[in-house]
Structure formats: structure tokens, C-alpha cells
Image: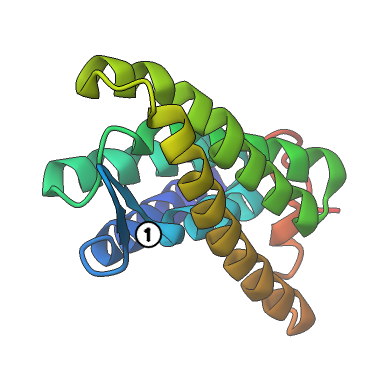
Amino acid sequence: MRKTEKLTYTAIIAALTTATSGFIYIPIGFAKIFPIQHFANVLAAVLLGPWYALAQAFISSTLRILMGTGSFFAYPGSMIGAVLAAYLFAKTKKYTFAVIGEVIGTGILGALATYPIGLFLLGKETTLFGLMPAFMMSSFVGAWMAYGLLRVFKKNKVFGGVHIENSINNRRV
């Protein structure tokens, strides 16, 4: 896939994620849990590779914050999850590892990374234990939705080899 195509797909995924953030979310205290972001992270990780998945997560998080449909907790969760999902998929070429990378990256590592933000912005030390279960649940639901869609696409030969291509080796397998 050429660089222009990857940039276009990144923009489309980020736009769809941002557009749906206004009406598909679950308010959990001071955070807005958004499974569609994790869905988009896994899709971008599998189709585009780590750097484009990271860019998509950053763009989506920034736009959601600017629109008032997201919080600053979106940055570490979505970006770490997207990169880990893409990295694990690039190494294994298995959708399941992309899902696991998203859940671990967002649910555990992303929640740990939000601790300093929560402490600084909210002054509460409970953000870690309040956000980790919510992040885990949200990333699990969104990542498995993406897994289902990717399996349907693979079964119907929608990709034509693009799903194995990634920004690490830029070859179709």
C-alpha cells in the first residue's frame, strides 16, 4: 500500500471515530469510555501498521477533546493500545494478538499512564483503580468487535493481501 493510501485510510478511520464519538460512548465518572476508538485502533493496527495506528489514535483523541466528546485520558489509553496492537500483529500476523495488544495496551498500560494525569488534573489517587476496569472493559468490547469484522473481511477476501502488509516490512505475504 502506498503512503498516500495509508494516510487516506488513517484520515478516514480517524474521521469515522470522531464522528461517532458524539453519540456512542459510556460515561464513567470523569471519563467517557468509547469502544469505537478501540475498534478503530485494531483496524488501523492491522491494516496500516504501528505509526499510522498511532497517528489515527492521536488525531481521534485530539478531535474528540476539541469537540468536548472526550477527555485527556484518551491520549495515553488509545495511543499505547494502538501501537501495542500494531506491534504484536506485525510480529505474529494474527488478529488475536492485535486484540490482546489493544486490551493490554489500553486497559493496563494506558490506565497506568493516566494515573499522573488524573493526579495532576483531578487531584485524586483513585483514578488508577477507577479507570483500569473501565478501560479494560471498553478496549475488550471494541477490540473484539474489530476482530469479528476482520474475520468477516478475511473470509470474504476483502483485503487481497493488504491485511498482512504493515509499515515495518511493507510487503504482502
Q: Which residue is depicted at the point 75% across and 45% down? A: 89
* Circle 1 Cα neighbour tier, 10 Å, few/some/many (<14 / 14–19 / ≥20): few
Q: Which residue is depicted at the point 75% across and 74% down? A: 154
Residue tagged by mark 1? Answer: 12
Of the pair 168 and 73, the residue shown nearer to us = 73
Q: Residue furthest left?
A: 67
Is residue 161 positioned above or below 127 on the image? Answer: below
Taking the image as shown, residue 40 lies to the left or right of residue 2, namely left
Taking the image as shown, residue 64 lies to the left or right of residue 171, namely left
| Residue 83 coordinates in the image, percent (x, y) | 59, 35
Of the pair 2 and 51, the residue shown nearer to us = 51
Q: Is residue 55 visible?
A: no
Of the pair 18 and 99, the residue shown nearer to us = 99
| Residue 164 coordinates in the image, percent (x, y) | 77, 54
Q: Is residue 9 visible?
A: yes
Number of numbered discs visible in the structure rendering? 1
Dividing the picture into quarters, in which one does residue 153 lie? bottom right
Give amino acid for label 1: Ile
Q: Which residue is depicted at the point 59% across and 53% down? A: 42
Classify mark 1: helix, strand or loop: helix
Dividing the picture into quarters, in which one does residue 126 lie? top left
| Residue 163 coordinates in the image, percent (x, y) | 71, 59
Taking the image as shown, residue 77 lies to the left or right of residue 153, namely left
| Residue 72 coordinates in the image, percent (x, y) | 27, 32
The color scheme shown is rainbow
